[in-house]
Amino acid sequence: MTKKLRAGILGATGTVGQRFAELLADHPWFEITALAASERSTGKQFREACSWKLVSPMPEALKELTVRDLKPDLDCDFVFSSLPNDMAGPVEEAFALAGYPVISNSSSHRLDVDVPLLVPEISYAHCDLIPVQKARRGYDRGYIVTNPNCSTMAVILPLAALDRDFGVEGVVTTTLQAVSGAGYPGVASMDIVDNVVPYIGGEEEKMEAEARKILGRLQGESVEYAPFILAAHCNRVNVMDGHLATVSVKLKKPATREDVIASMRGYVSVPQELKLPSAPVSPIVVREEIDRPQPRLDRETERGMACVVGRVRKCPLFDFKFVALGHNTIRGAAGGAILNAELLRAKGYL
Ligand code: NAP
């Protein structure tokens, strides 16, 4: 790769926007040249507009960049979108129509029939929806590609490994989701300190549909959803970053515990073969300790890009139980979107 592609970030000042800024600071293929956010931030320098919440310092190169509004005339080749779900839809469409590839974190277009819901290890073939989408919507250079919700991302890699090797027939999962998943300022401290909130609006429905689309097969001009049923219970817990999920899974073919672990440990796919810059070497890291994974100890595994699995054991009701952990703002948001952009670049879509 020679010249870096110029990226814009819509929603640059938010929780996910800040992760984009951090992860793209030294990216070999992409550089940030445009930032956009709400009218609260428009016209200000990034350092004034953004209440920076990450441990790493704000990248020097961005501090004096002026935050723009959401008009599709930004100085960049494509945009990452981390806008609130209730307003992302029409903004992303306007950017795509104006010729910008839009790589989105928001839920607005994830289930559109002509929009890829991309996890590069799993649904890479769904990129073939891009020309379908362009033709159907009258886009020229632009298009929309999405990544899954952060809770779906926490469980989908091990489910993909098991589906590939044994077939998945049914899943029950209960999540324990970090507060950063709600953006900033998110859940009020008086609601979450010393507490668990057993409701996250729309989250269970998203997991139940998205997992089946990601594991679905592209048939002609749409994705045929995978035929299993996933039942999700979603909870907000007092953890800063990292969504943990307990998973019980029913398989189509018999497997031993060793088979299940070998299937997950051996799971590599297109991003690893292509050596994409953000690809984890091991997308699924299986730990043997009886009390792992834990968010604080394990969320940074593979720079936050892997799913960490533990406690693989027989399930008395289904076939196997395990615990899965994913970093919600890295693999579950900005890092996942950057990996999508890398796949699109490698495949000639960017
Ligand atoms: P956030 O912290 O609330 O940030 C929202 C961003 O959008 C800010 O930059 C904000 O700009 C901007 N914004 C808000 N209202 C706007 C408006 N009316 N017009 C233009 N810009 C506006 O949220 P987040 O957690 O980063 O989430 C962003 C998106 O990513 C959401 O769709 C969310 O569902 C999705 N997502 C989040 C996570 C996660 O772990 N947090 C994971 C996966 C997906 P100002 O600073 O100017 O207000």
Image: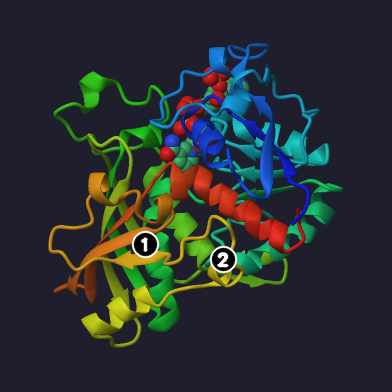
Q: CA distance from mark 1 to mark 2?
A: 26 Å
Tell me if mark 1 has few (under 14), some (14-19) or many (20+) residues whose alpha carbon lies within 10 angstroms of its own: many
Instruction: Please say which color scheme the image uses.
Output: rainbow
Instruction: For marks 1 and 2, give the one nearer the viewer.
Output: 2
Label 2's element?
helix
Q: Which residue position is annotated with label 2?
A: 271
Q: Nearer the viewer, residue 95 or 336?
A: 336
Q: Is residue 299 left or right of residue 163?
A: left
Label whose residue precedes the other's in the sequence (1 or 2): 1
Tell me if mark 2 has few (under 14), some (14-19) or many (20+) residues whose alpha carbon lies within 10 angstroms of its own: many
Residue at x-position 64% and y-position 50%: 28
Q: Which residue position is annotated with label 1?
A: 230
Q: Quadrant of residue 228?
A: bottom left
Whether residue 327 can be seen here: yes
In the rendered image, the vertical position of residue 204 relative to residue 286, given as above or below: above
Q: Where does the image place residue 157, in percent across and percent down from the top left?
A: 42, 64
Label 1's element?
strand
Residue at x-position 24% and y-position 39%: 198
Q: Where does the image place residue 347, in percent across and percent down from the top left?
A: 72, 64
Tell how many labels. Answer: 2
Q: Quadrant of residue 237?
A: top left
Q: Is residue 162 left or right of residue 116?
A: left
Q: Nearer the viewer, residue 318 or 270?
A: 270
Q: Quadrant of residue 190?
A: top left
In the rendered image, the vertical position of residue 63 relative to residue 22, given as above or below: above
Q: Where does the image place residue 264, in percent across and percent down from the top left?
A: 36, 73
Q: Where does the image place residue 131, in percent across and percent down from the top left?
A: 79, 59
